[in-house]
Amino acid sequence: MAAHLSYGRVNLNVLREAVRRELREFLDKCAGSKAIVWDEYLTGPFGLIAQYSLLKEHEVEKMFTLKGSRLPAADVKNIIFFVRPRLELMDIIAENVLSEDRRGPARDFHILFVPRRSLLCEQRLKDLGVLGSFIHREEYSLDLIPFDGDLLSMESESAFKLENNCFTVLRWFLPYNNVNQPEGYECYLESDQTSLYHAAKGLMTLQALYGTIPQIFGKGECARQVANMMIRMKREFTGSQNSIFPVFDNLLLLDRNVDLLSPLATQLTYEGLIDEIYGIQNSYVKLPPEKFAPKKQGDGGKDLPTEAKKLQLNSAEELYAEIRDKNFNAVGSVLSKKAKVISAAFEERHNAKTVGEIKQFVSQLPHMQAARGSLANHTSIAELIKDVTTSEDFFDKLTVEQEFMSGIDTDKVNSYIEDCIAQKHPLIKVLRLVCLQSVCNSGLKQKVLDYYKREILQTYGYEHILTLHNLEKAGLLKPQMGGRNNYPTIRKTLRLWMDDVNEQNPTDISYVYSGYAPLSVRLAQLLSRPGWRSIEEVLRILPGPHFEERQPLPTGLQKKRQPGENRVTLIFFLGGVTFAEIAALRFLSQLEDGGTEYVIATTKLINGASWIESLMEKPF
């Protein structure tokens, strides 16, 4: 059991155990010793549900990364390939299988497609002459992975876009035709519907484990599609009535393109900044090692470690759970207080006189040493982040972002962006700022847009013309239509900009960006109280339909809420969510008079850089 998955109102260990059980059942079908050959992209997500100890219990003796040519030698009966359904991976698998056949003795081969089997992939294996070598060809529906006690992610990636780990957001803005395309339908339409289908399937799995969700709310075209798929799936399973008492009261489905602004802005929470600067992958971060080297006297800095320091970040760590969602400016004082408390606890050993007192101190020692190690790690991380946030460039960039978000000078060429292009700052940084300006102005004036495009192409190369085209298609970088800027109306109605933000003791969600309240989270807050009827005008301006569906429950399963008991809302971000938005939702969950606790699900955990990168075309 992973204790940090069961601290909230919803015990996500139930989901984790269901996923682990399915994995164990598959491994047991392959009797005898086993070697697993991993598609490298899957190792991170699988690490969150099944450590090596579980695999070892089921006779897994070796693990390899999927690579071309011959597999490393392994004296095992079964070789199992864990792969995504991608044609280029089938070519590598065929190469592996054929080289093993030549090597002898005969092995049993099996393939597990994650999250689905693909007829195209099986046809490719057949064409390469190895399909018949596989005894088991099955799929493993790893739709939603528990990351923390209130966080689930599909860690989905594009099936038609770049060869990277980022969810390609472009497809969330393209038209959706023909939901029932056959598997293997060409290009991104098939990918599109498949991604939405897996989101709906993941939600159906949750309902099977945690009960039917009585009310579904949604905003956006993809949200509507997913809700329709869920309703259709439920109709198809009418024979089996769900008799589990509902844990969730509401489901809110939100398209990422309803709020393009939040991922583009720099996150200013502790966890958000770690992700912005170093990137958090599957709950792990890799950090520069020099800050974590033990300091020895007279060493003179010799023999500093060269391998990155890898740390797991989740709420199982007490200190991280306390500071992860705080504005970074409030983290220093918490670390300082914690250092004093830990120091005082260690000093208690001098006061331990009796055998009983000494025994009690010794029993607390492991916890105290863990706390001291945790404090040392987070003090080092905070120092690394501070080196960035106190730089002049970080301040200038943040100032420009905040001017755009508060509605200042969004309609003309920005001198800071001009300077960044002239000095050839990283292209992702430039694109992120230009897109932020475009979103905060409901599109740029044509001459401003043309100027930025020309400067970017002349400075960074004309091969990036496709990237600019992708950004335009995604609605991130576009000309203003009809000369009307709707952002001021949205900003004022939803109170997206707050001038007076208390970063130390916040009273509003705007603390996560030091002034800007994420639009997506404000929509969730207003849905909870007083309801979306109060913002009908803004909902009409924002892209896509908004809707409400009810799923009837049998009489015995209808919930009678106790006085003071909060509702539980599952909020599903289709197209990705940032750690700052997650922090804002946790803030709302903890409000005494909030009335709602949130569990967050998403297709992918993203930040502005990874999001923009997912839309960039690689140079030829």
Image: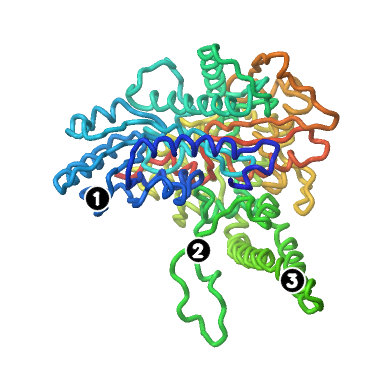
For residue 469, say whether it is visible.
Answer: no
For residue 602, say whether it is visible.
Answer: yes
Left or right: 83 as drawn, with respect to 421: left
Disc 1 versus disc 3: nearer the observer? 3
How many angstroms separate mark 2 from mark 1 (CA)?
29 Å
Q: Does 258 appear above or below 516? A: above
Residue positioned 72% across, 23% down in the render: 532
Which is more N-terminal, label 3 or label 1? Answer: 1
Type of amino acid under label 3: Lys
Which is more N-terminal, label 1 or label 2? Answer: 1
Q: 133 or 270, which lies in front?
A: 133
Q: Which mark is residue 359?
A: 3
- Count neighbours of disc 1 (C-alpha within 10 A) and say few if under 14, some if 14 to 19, many if 20 or more: some
Q: x%, y% of residue 567?
A: 75, 30
Question: If the image is split into quadrants, where does the C terminus sit?
Answer: top left
Q: Does 274 appear above or below 358? A: above
Q: x%, y% of residue 270?
A: 64, 54
Left or right: 423 as drawn, with respect to 385: left
- Count neighbours of disc 3 (C-alpha within 10 A) and say few if under 14, some if 14 to 19, many if 20 or more: few
Disc 3 versus disc 2: nearer the observer? 3
Q: Which mark is residue 495?
A: none
Type of amino acid under label 2: Lys
User: Which residue in the structure is indicated by mark 2?
Assistant: 309
User: Which residue in the structure is indicated by mark 1?
Assistant: 71
